[in-house]
Image: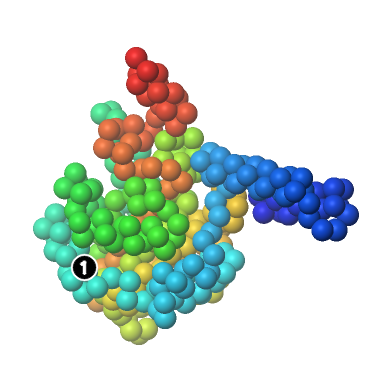
C-alpha cells in the first residue's frame, strides 16, 4: 500500500466511524489533522530511508518549464524540456570539459578508493564506446554557472542540487554508442547518498534523425532525438518504491558525426558533501550518529 492509499484509508475510517459522513465537528477536525501529520511524517521518513520516492506532479513541472515541456511517458515518468540550457551555458560546459580532457567511458558505476574517495571504475567495454570527463573538482562545485544549472534541474525534478552527482560530459564520435542499460545503482541503498534513482540528461548538440544519436527506450518504444539545449529526465525506480524499473532501460544509438551531452544523476540523499569528505561509502545511520556524538563532545 502506498503512502497516498494509506492516507486515504485513514480519512475514510475517520469519516465512517466518527462522523457517519455528517458535518465535521472540532474533534473530527483534530483527528483529521493528526492523521495528516502522521502521513506526512511517514512519507518524509520513508523518503529519507530510501523506501519511497514521489514523482513531482505534472502541473508543477509545467509551471517550471512552461511551453517547452513534453510528457513522453507518464508511467514510467519520462519528460523532455526544450531550451533548458542557454547557448552561453552550453559553450561554457564544453570549454570546461575540453580543457579538462576526455577519456574513454567505462560501464559499471563507481566504487571506493583506498583514500575514501570514489571513482568511476566500471570496466572498458564494447557496450560503451564514448568518451567522458567529470566536472568534479572543488572549483566546479562552487562554480556559479554549473550550480545554477543544477539548482534549476533540482527544482524541476524535486531533488536538492547537492543530491546530484557531478556533471559527466559525454562525447560520442562517429558510430559510437552505449548499449541498452539502466542507471540504477542498488549497492548504494545503505550508503550515505542512497540509491541513484534519477537521470537528468542534457544535449549539447543537435542531430537530425538521419544522423542517429537518439536516446532509445526499447520497453517504451520511444526515441528522443538530440536537440541542442534540450533536457530529458526519467526515474530508474518505480513510483513510491525504491525498486529498479526496467522500463527505463535505455541506449545511446550510434551517431554519424560528433554528439555532446551531459549526465546529471540524482540520489535520494546528499551526494556532494560525502564525496568531498570521502565518506560516500560510509553507512548513513552510523556516520550520522558518530557526527552527533562528536558534536556533543
Res 93 → quadrant: bottom left
Q: Is residue 168 left or right of residue 236?
A: left
Q: Residue at x 42, y 63 (%)?
A: 156
The quadrant in which residue 69 appears is bottom left
Q: Name the residue located 23 percent from the left edge and 48 percent from the top edge.
A: 141
Residues packed near mark 1 inside 10 Å, few (<14), some (14 to 19) or many (20 plus):
some
Q: Residue at x 25, y 64 (%)?
A: 171
Where residue 293 sits: x, y (%)? 40, 18
Q: Is residue 224 above or below residue 179?
A: below
Label 1 SS: helix
- Judge left or right: residue 11 versus residue 121: right
Q: Is residue 214 above or below residue 185?
A: below
Residue furthest front in the image: 26
Viewer-proximal residue among 246 and 65 = 65
91 lies above or below 160: below
Residue 124 lies, in percent from the top left, at 31, 50
Q: Quadrant of the C terminus?
A: top left
Residue 80 in view here: no
Answer whether residue 82 is visible to the viewer in this image.
Answer: yes
Q: Position of residue 45 (x, y in %)?
A: 56, 40
Q: Residue at x 73, y 45 (%)?
A: 31
Q: Quadrant of residue 208?
A: bottom left
Q: In this orientation, which residue lies closer to the viewer: 237 or 56?
A: 56
Outermost residue, left direction? Answer: 99
**Percent x, y for residue 145?**
21, 60
The answer to whether 244 appears left or right of 283 in the picture is right
Q: Which residue was labeled with disc 1?
A: 89
Structure colour scheme: rainbow
Amino acid at each position: 500500500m502506498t503512502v497516498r492509499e494509506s492516507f486515504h484509508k485513514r480519512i475514510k475510517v475517520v469519516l465512517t466511524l466518527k462522523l457517519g459522513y455528517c458535518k465535521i465537528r472540532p474533534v473530527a477536525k483534530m483527528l483529521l489533522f493528526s492523521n495528516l501529520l502522521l502521513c506526512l511524517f511517514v512519507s518524509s521518513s520513508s523518503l529519507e530511508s530510501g523506501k519511497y520516492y514521489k514523482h513531482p506532479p505534472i502541473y508543477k513541472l509545467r509551471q517550471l518549464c512552461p511551453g517547452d515541456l513534453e510528457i513522453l511517458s507518464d508511467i514510467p515518468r519520462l519528460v523532455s524540456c526544450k531550451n533548458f540550457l542557454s547557448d552561453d551555458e552550453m559553450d561554457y560546459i564544453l570549454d570546461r570539459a575540453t580543457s579538462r580532457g576526455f577519456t574513454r567511458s567505462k560501464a559499471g558505476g563507481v566504487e571506493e578508493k583506498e583514500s575514501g574517495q570514489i571513482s568511476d571504475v566500471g570496466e572498458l567495454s564494447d557496450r560503451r564506446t564514448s568518451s567522458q570527463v567529470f566536472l568534479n573538482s572543488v572549483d566546479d562545485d562552487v562554480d556559479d554557472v554549473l550550480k545554477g544549472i543544477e539548482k534549476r534541474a533540482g527544482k524541476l525534478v524535486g531533488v536538492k542540487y547537492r543530491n546530484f552527482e557531478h556533471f559527466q560530459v559525454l562525447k560520442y564520435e562517429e558510430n559510437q554508442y552505449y548499449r541498452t542499460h539502466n542507471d540504477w545503482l542498488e549497492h548504494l541503498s545503505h550508503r550515505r547518498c542512497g540509491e541513484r534513482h534519477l537521470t537528468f540528461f542534457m544535449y549539447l548538440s543537435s542531430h537530425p534523425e538521419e544522423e542517429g544519436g537518439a536516446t532509445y527506450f526499447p520497453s517504451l518504444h520511444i526515441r528522443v532525438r538530440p536537440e541542442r539545449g534540450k533536457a530529458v529526465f526519467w526515474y530508474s525506480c518505480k513510483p513510491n518504491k525504491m525498486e529498479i524499473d526496467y522500463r527505463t532501460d535505455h541506449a545511446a544509438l550510434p551517431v554519424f558525426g560528433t554528439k555532446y551531452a551531459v549526465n546529471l544523476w540524482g540520489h535520494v540523499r546528499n551526494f556532494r558533501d560525502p564525496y568531498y569528505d570521502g565518506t560516500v561509502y560510509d553507512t548513513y545511520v552510523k556516520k550520522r550518529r558518530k557526527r552527533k556524538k562528536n558534536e556533543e563532545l
